[in-house]
């Protein structure tokens, strides 16, 4: 049987694609993997956060800004809930310029988003998970915090402020 040259070519090309697709999935599943929210922030009892019972949450302090336990930079603990960030909405979060800021963000109710406008600081905030990540702000400035996951009727009003101060 004769197979046309172009047919062979396309057959080969589609095989390459299939192998690439499968390879991508295998890489994600058993390879180095892809970092996801909460991989190192750990889990948290969402009900305790909702009750404001932070003594029960080993890896999460009361919301606010703290000197880092390793003496370098600050730790910021933020609770998202319908439809505010605590802190952030009622009062701006203040963090120092040029120091490592470790964010710990969790939700007291449903899935929210945490995005610092005009930066690549962007995470999902999932009840039961702590999103933990480090950011060093090189310049002072004011950033809007926006929730970018639909979380209910007040989603579009859910916002806050972060100020980087000298
Ligand atoms: Cu919270 Cu949208």
Image (spheres, rainbow, N blue to C red):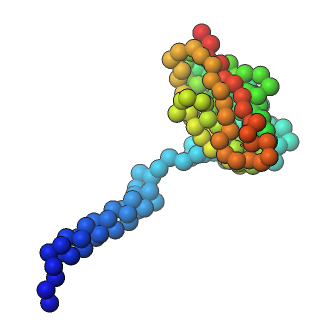
Up-down: is 134 above or below 13?
above
Q: Is residue 35 visible in the rendered structure shown here?
A: yes
Residue lying at the far right in this picture: please name it: 51
Residue 111 drawn at (x, y percent): 70, 48
Given residues 86 and 62, the one toward you in this image is 86
> At x 77% / y 31%, what residue is drawn?
86
Given residues 138 and 116, the one toward you in this image is 116
Up-down: is 109 above or below 132?
below
> At x 86% / y 42%, what residue is drawn?
51
Up-down: is 24 above or below 76?
below
Q: Is residue 125 visible in the rendered structure shown here?
A: no
Q: On the rendered image, what quadrant is the C terminus found in?
A: top right
Left-right relation of 72 to 129 = left
Q: On the rendered image, what quadrant is the N terminus found in?
A: bottom left
Residue lying at the far bottom in this picture: please name it: 1
Q: How many marks?
A: 0
> At x 42% / y 61%, what residue is drawn?
25
- Dividing the picture into quarters, in which one does residue 92 lie? top right
> At x 28% / y 70%, what residue is drawn?
15
Up-down: is 123 above or below 134?
below
Residue 37 drawn at (x, y percent): 58, 45
Residue 137 drawn at (x, y percent): 54, 21
Given residues 129 and 151, the one toward you in this image is 151
Left-right relation of 43 to 29 = right
- Dividing the picture into quarters, in which one does residue 121 lie? top right
């Amino acid at each position: 049987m004769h197979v046309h040259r172009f047919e062979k070519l396309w057959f080969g090309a589609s095989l390459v694609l299939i192998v690439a697709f499968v390879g991508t999935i295998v890489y994600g599943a058993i390879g180095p993997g892809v970092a996801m929210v909460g991989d190192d922030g750990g889990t948290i009892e969402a009900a305790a956060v909702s009750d404001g019972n932070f003594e029960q949450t080993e890896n999460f302090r009361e919301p606010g800004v703290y000197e880092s336990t390793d003496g370098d930079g600050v730790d910021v603990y933020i609770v998202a809930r319908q439809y505010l960030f605590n802190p952030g909405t009622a009062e701006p979060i203040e963090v120092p310029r040029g120091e490592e800021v470790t964010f710990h963000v969790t939700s007291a109710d449903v899935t929210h988003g945490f995005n610092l406008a005009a930066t690549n600081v962007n995470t999902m905030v999932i009840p039961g998970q702590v999103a933990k990540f480090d950011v060093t702000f090189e310049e002072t400035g004011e950033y809007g915090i926006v929730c970018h996951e639909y979380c209910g009727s007040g989603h579009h009003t859910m916002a806050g402020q972060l100020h980087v101060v000298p």
